[in-house]
Image (spheres, rainbow, N blue to C red):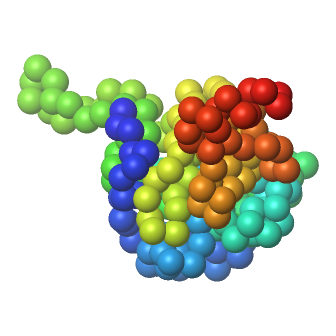
Amino acid sequence: MSVLVGKKAPKFVAPAVINGEEIVEDFSLEQYIGKKHVLFFFYPKDFTFVCPTELHAFQEKLAEFESRNVAVVACSTDTEQSHWGWLQLPKKQGGIEGITYPLVADTSKAISTNFGVLAGEYEYNEEGFLTAKGPMIAYRGLFLIDKEGVVRHQIVNDLPLGRNVDEAIRMVDALQYFETKGEVCPANWKQGEKAMDATFSGVASYFSEN
């Protein structure tokens, strides 16, 4: 599994469902370069159990991301038609009706592979046949990408483990605070709390006040 922090996020062009209903064939994160930070997250499969809780949780906090000028984008290895069908199903029936941020269709599994979150790999067996080892779906990867297209934070959970959306917002706040103030954010830092300047005197001052 690759570590992308500090590197340019892999480029892709793929189908996606946007605004909860419209299928586009050429969705790309490049549209946000120079304009927005991006919170790009992978989930394993449509029509499952933990996944809709995460998708709805991000939707519920979408206004908070947007107020920070952050675009939220999701991706799985399902088709765009599968995404669209799931979007038509009400929440009470296990669907994701009401999700408005883009859902990218990584049917080739190339995006998941390039981001290092594909659970499984292709290999040849003893008879020379190409086989798949593993479920060949995405782990719960999450990537915070800055306006220059550089990954600044990533976290990858195993398939059964849902993520904490408030923690994702905290990481956005920490990155944006550093970008605007130049100060670094210590453990458990939250918006509105004191940060520190990255010098020995700055660290001493921080600890003397906390």
Q: Looking at the image, is 148 positioned above or below residue 61?
A: below
Q: What residue is at 43 percent from the left and 39 percent from the top?
A: 117
Between 130 and 146, which is closer to the camera in this rendering? 146
Q: What residue is at 78 percent from the left and 27 percent from the top?
A: 208
Position of residue 179 measured from the top left corner of the image (x, y, whole percent)? 59, 60
Q: What residue is at 30 percent from the left and 33 percent from the top?
A: 121
Position of residue 18 measured from the top left corner of the image (x, y, whole percent)? 64, 74
Between 44 and 28, which is closer to the camera in this rendering? 28
- Total labels: the figure holds 0
Query: In the figure, is residue 41 to the left or right of 86?
Result: left
Q: What residue is at 72 percent from the left and 53 percent from the top?
A: 173
Query: Does residue 75 appear in the picture of this structure?
Result: no
Between 74 and 44, which is closer to the camera in this rendering? 74
Locate the N terminus and report the quarter of the image it occupies. Answer: top left
Q: Looking at the image, is 173 positioned above or below residue 180?
A: above
Q: Looking at the image, is 39 positioned above or below residue 135?
A: below
